[in-house]
Amino acid sequence: MTAVTMHLGEIGQQLRAFRLESGMRADEIAARLGVSRAALYRYEKGEVIKLDTVQRLAELLNISPLTLLGVGIEYYSCPDSFFQKITQIEGDIEQILQVSDPVCYQVTSPAYDAVLLEAHASQQGKEGGALMDAPAILAQSKRRALYSQRKPSIISMLPENQIIDFLTHGVGAGFPMSPTLRHKARQVAVQEIRNIITLIDSVPMGLQFSVIPKNITTTSCIFMRRSELMAVAINPFRTDCSAESTAGIAMITSSPEAVATHQHMLETLWQTSLKGREAIDRLKALVEHHGAV
């Protein structure tokens, strides 16, 4: 019962979000759940919900009951769906501990997205079709905006191997680009790493970086916490990936075992990674050797 009680607030948030986004009337949703309208609003506030109602709510939200209760696993095969979900979670958290990408997306510059959108538009034009939205890119931009508004604590560990690849190929390595745009993508990559160097040197409150040496192999994952509620995402997708050239399955879970295991791994990795002046010196050396444009 403790695990269920811990996630009642989360269940209420999901129910309220569904009601607001679906366009359905509260009476209609209550009828589908087999409860009164008053009970529906109580559930949205995080009050105790009956298990048979949890089953019907899971069917309404098209997820498993275990996932709704925070002990299951959500799977994502598309970057845009995964990053949209991460954006939703990050809108209400206090702490992020992550090994994810050669940069921390939340503090990247608008130039990062601009290169990806330009590459996406160019590719759409070559294929002769109408210009489509780039949902993964647009979902990501909301993450940056949320961070600017809320400023949760972030500890971001950057794998050295990914930094080298980032500096060598630029933002959006998986996107087909013209030589001119690829040159621009490399310039933006260099500037993003230099921005991180500046942030490490200035030590802003609630934002810390480290560099994971290239002899250490890591799994990209994101640990997220709000009060007693915690979740972990295991993520094969880079924030600058092309959906057309990316294959993998991302997973998000609040399972206590998964959360505790990944939290311990990340905290241990933080202790052994390069921080402060060591991280700055390593990043400067990488820019010098791999970032010449």
Image (cartoon, rainbow, N blue to C red):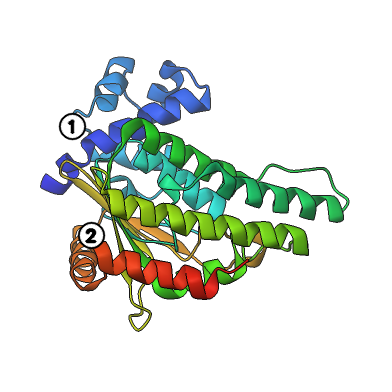
Rendered image: mark on residue 259: 2
Q: Nearer the viewer, residue 130 or 216?
A: 216
Q: Quadrant of residue 6?
A: top left
Q: SS at mark 1?
A: loop
- Give the Cα separation between the discs numbered 1 and 2: 24 Å
Q: Which residue is mark 1?
A: 48
Give the tally of numbered discs.
2
Q: Residues within 10 Å of mark 2 (few under 14, many from 20)?
A: many
Residue 94: % across, % down: 24, 41
Residue at (71, 53) in percent of width and height = 119
Residue at (22, 33) in percent of width and height = 49
Q: Nearer the viewer, residue 129 or 23?
A: 129
The N terminus appears in which quarter of the rendering? top left
Q: Residues within 10 Å of mark 1 (few under 14, many from 20)?
A: some
Would residue 240 appear left or right of 203 to someone viewing this image?
right
Q: Is residue 93 visible?
A: yes
